Amino acid sequence: MTPARVSSAAGSLWFASSWWAASKGEGRVAPMTVRCVEVYPDAVHLQGFLSLEAQRRLAEQCHVIGTGPVGWYVPTVRGRGKMRVEMVCLGYHWNARTYRYQATRDDHDGRPVPALPADLSELAREMAVAAGTAVEPDVCILNYYGPAGKMGLHQDKDERPETLEAGLPIVSVSLGDTAKFIIGGFTRAEPKTMVPLASGDGFVFGGRSRLRYHGVAAILPGTGPATLGLEGRYNLTFRQGAASQ
Ligand code: SIN
Ligand code: MN
């Protein structure tokens, strides 16, 4: 379901979102209001995109995926040791040693990567539209951050060259404890902005911001909604252009 733009105000736009109800066949729910803040050109923070109930159910889905037979593992990155997150890829696997996408988890257990569920793709599409862009995701990287989790500054540039040239966006969804998300310029040294990504927020960066350096400086323990029963944070990043490498 495409979200409807219901009004606009200086520096922010408001949308109605009913993703979860639509994807679960539960009919319409009261429209959500979402505050859209453009942090950089084409880098949009969607504050409060998911209702608490949608967060709860998505967190449960993440838990089931992560604790399933092809679940969490801690990637070891080429030359930089173990990452500070637990990861599961859906649709395609991001190989932390080769920085390429593939169908099996060759840098971990060699198992075939789980499919990307249709309702998750739909969520990513809807968030992209809310941010004024579009994506047809073929991969989702689901990360779990414990209380000490973090992610170093990096660019997302492992998708197909056509994806990067077209500026097709990364769509990020956060659940649980708030993250101090850092985003800056096109070199590591450029000034950075801290964006607090709270539970239920989206962050969409494409176009002129597709290759900005970004990372997670820290998780703020105990800041997520208690009803999720989640210590730490889930983050899902959807990408287009993992296929046919
Ligand atoms: C990532 O850059 O891949 C993850 C960002 C986040 O956890 O917010
Ligand atoms: Mn990234």
Image: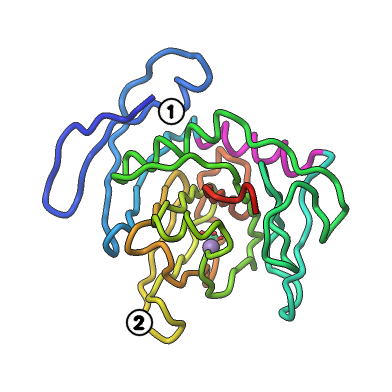
Relative depth, front residue between 63 and 126? 126
Residue at 26% x, 57% y is 38
- From where the camera sits, is residue 220 visible? no
Residue 185: % across, % down: 37, 76
* SS at circle 2: loop
Chief secondary structure of the magenta portion: helix
Occupied quadrant, residue 75: bottom right
Residue that protrudes farthest toward the bottom in the picture: 189
Residue at 72% x, 36% y is 64
Residues drawn in magenta: 55-68
Residue 65 included in the magenta stretch of the image: yes
Residue at 43% x, 13% y is 27
**Residue 191: numbered disc:** 2
Residue at 71% x, 51% y is 93
Colour option used: rainbow
Residue 216: % across, % down: 52, 68
Q: Which residue is mark 1?
A: 19
Q: From the Cβ of disc 2, is ligand 1 less than 8 Å away? A: no
Q: How far is disc 2 from disc 1 in space, using C-alphas?
A: 35 Å
Residue type pointed to by label 2: Pro
Residue 175: % across, % down: 53, 47
Residue type pointed to by label 1: Trp
Residue 127 included in the magenta stretch of the image: no
Is 149 on the left-hand or right-hand side of 18?
right
Occupied quadrant, residue 68: top right
Is 190 on the left-hand or right-hand side of 4?
right
Quadrant for the C terminus, please.
bottom right
* SS at circle 1: helix
Residue 131: % across, % down: 31, 46
- From where the camera sits, is residue 193 visible? yes
Relative depth, front residue between 233 and 111? 111
Q: Is residue 120 above or below residue 107?
A: above
